Image (tube, rainbow, N blue to C red):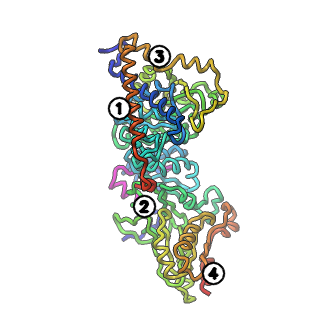
Amino acid sequence: MRTRCSIPEKTLQEMMRRMLRIRLFEERASDIRVEAKLPGVLHNCIGQEAAIVGACMALRADDFLTGNHRSHGHPIGKGVSLAPLMAELFGKRTGVCRGKGGSMHLADFSAGSLGESGIVGSLMPVAVGAGLSARLRGTDQVCLCFFGDGAANCGPFHESLNLAAIWKLPVVFLCENNGYAIHTPQAQTTAVADIAQRAQGYGMQGEVVDGQDVLAVHDRVVHAVARARDGSGPALIEAKTYRYCEHSEFGEPADPPPYRNEQEIAFWRARDPIELFLGRLEAWGALTREAFAAMKAAVRAEVDAAVAFARQSPAPEPQALWEDVFI
Amino acid sequence: MAEMTYAEAAKQAIVEEMRRNRRVFVLGQDVQTGAYAEVLPEFGPERIRNTPICEAGFYGAGIGAALTGMRPVIEAAFSTFCYSAMDQIVNQAAKSRYMFGGQASVPLVIRAFVAYTVAFAAHHSDRPWGLFAQVPGLKIIVPTTPYDVKGLLISAIRDGNPVLCFDDLTLASMRGDVPEGEYTIPIGLADVKRVGSDVTVVAVGGAVHRALHAARMLEGDGVSAEVVDIRSVAPLDRRTILTSVAKTGRLIVVDPAPGTCSVASEVAATVAEQAFTRLKAPVVRLTAPDIPVPFSPNLERLMFPTGEDIVRAARELIH
């Protein structure tokens, strides 16, 4: 069965499932952290799931992606299994990075996820290199490079856009613009209204898309990926979205600094990407409330199983400290 | 065997590896018109890749290519330019393998000149091997002869890890015999460049040739100096150094980099920890002072340890 948006129903449902997997994974990780069971810090992306999933689902299995510090959602968006991600948050031996990376450094090379970075903007040039490598190896792989509005003011953003453009590389730059660089609003850090405007200065296409609308994001990224794949070069897509959570979660929960107001939060909460999408799928008859509830229960069970796996997994052996410095 | 310069031997290593392995490519500023102009028709602009002046960008592109199956060689020009890509080198190239639990490998070579004693002043004259030795996950080589640079660079290109190769520009026109075709010198092995019995002189980069010069002068005094070329700063070949000091009982370390927390310090500390009882005299470090490199040749020449400094230090140790 096909819907009026021409995407197969199964694909639409999978989009919803991946958005739920991100949200429930992070909600659970947050709860567990508060119970003081998780070491370190979390940067959650709840509220931004449509931008992530819409973009990731435009990729082929052998395509690459790079993330940032707020990046649990990126490998999940690409469809990786949750248990090794959760075990990584626990710092366990069975973690996707064997407990060496943690929340800010998830990577699953088997799914083309080339890593995430605690340094803002730092992986953007690396994404360019993955695109260059695809060219030099003679494949038609594409690299999807996630970054935030904060990274758009770092040098590597500008250097990366320029390199990808002059070399016409298959890289799609996907800005998750959640409005804040930590606690500082975009208006204080960026003289242009849209990060996408900057694409023009590098000779590439740039466009703004509603980041709460998974299908809108998907449509534009599918287009950009297709162009990148056929050799037409990179693109910059800016998804306007919102971060429900605080910049990071560390230590005892505390009141955030008063940097955003209730009206703003209410405005974005009313445009929740999962609710928006659910409303549309319901209207199209592509997903009933009951089927949604069942999907959510199944995802919750998957998250439960991931947590159980993480809890039961052994800590890394002391010997692991010394392993993997060099190949 | 063919006689050639250090610079020619280095290029030969890279060009031969490019012929053997299509995954090897070069990127950097002006590579098409500079050192690789004559092989541009053979390899084309995709593999001899000119870059804009954007170190963070093109180092990162090299790292991304390395993470996904390529073997890039970055021509970095001056070592100080690496600082503009410090995040890429330190946070991405060096740490990715460890941080991602062994999933990643970054088979990347970065070649950078160290140019000193040529009045390039402070922004072009650093010898930063010790600075980068503080970064676990990097290998660091400092070849000192045409023979060594070819063998070490072939090893570096075949290595699965990021390798920084510092080319001491004072050696670029130095000539020596180099075998035709492929051979490798393992990274992590020091080289005894001259055998002796009275004092060990451990040196890095161009200082190796100052040490050899000093050893010839000392020979006239009846002093037999052994010269150990560090060759690989990371991993450091402690065994060869300790074996030499166990034999001679005396150690002079010569390093043209600033002395504080330097490679010279690491060698001295290693010997103090592991061969203290074999020492007949205190360890001597001859390094640059902790000063930026000045422009005026009259000042710059005061910066770096000379052959005469080494001779003087050896005489004091022995008498």
Label 4: which residue? B312
Q: Callout 3: residue from which chain?
A: A
Label 4: few (<14), some (14–19) or many (≥20) C-alpha neighbours in 10 Å: few
Mark 4: amino acid? Arg
Are the residues flagged by discs 4 and 1 from a single subunit? no
Are discs 1 and 2 less than 8 Å apart at CB?
A: no
Q: Which residue is mark 1?
A: A60
Amino acid at circle 1: Arg
Mark 3 and mark 4 in contact? Answer it, CB < 8 Å.
Answer: no
Quickly name the residue at label 3: A276
- Alpha carbon of mark 3 to alpha carbon of mark 1: how far? 26 Å
Task: Examine the image and state in which quarter residue B252 appears.
Answer: bottom right
Residue A233 lies within the magenta run? no
Residue nearer the viewer, A305 or A62: A305
Position of residue A293 measured from the top left corner of the image (x, y, whole percent): 39, 18
Q: SS class of the residue under badge 1?
A: loop
User: Does mark 2 fall on the same chain as mark 3?
Assistant: no
* Horizontal and vertical percent position of residue A275: 47, 17
Residue under label 2: B153
Query: Alpha carbon of mark 3 to alpha carbon of mark 2: how far?
Result: 57 Å
Q: Earlier in the sequence, mark 4 or mark 2?
A: 2
Say above or below: A169 vs B211.
above
Amino acid at circle 2:
Leu
The residue tagged with tag 3: helix, strand or loop?
A: helix
| Both labels 3 and 1 in a single chain | yes
Could you tell me which residue is drawn at 29 percent across and 15 percent down? A1
Name the residue located 52 percent from the left edge and 48 percent from the top edge.
B91
- Tell me the amino acid under the disc marked 3: Leu
Chain letter, disc 4 residue:
B
Whole-percent x, y for residue A255 in the image: 64, 30
Which of pointers 4 and 1 indicates the residue nearer the eye? 1
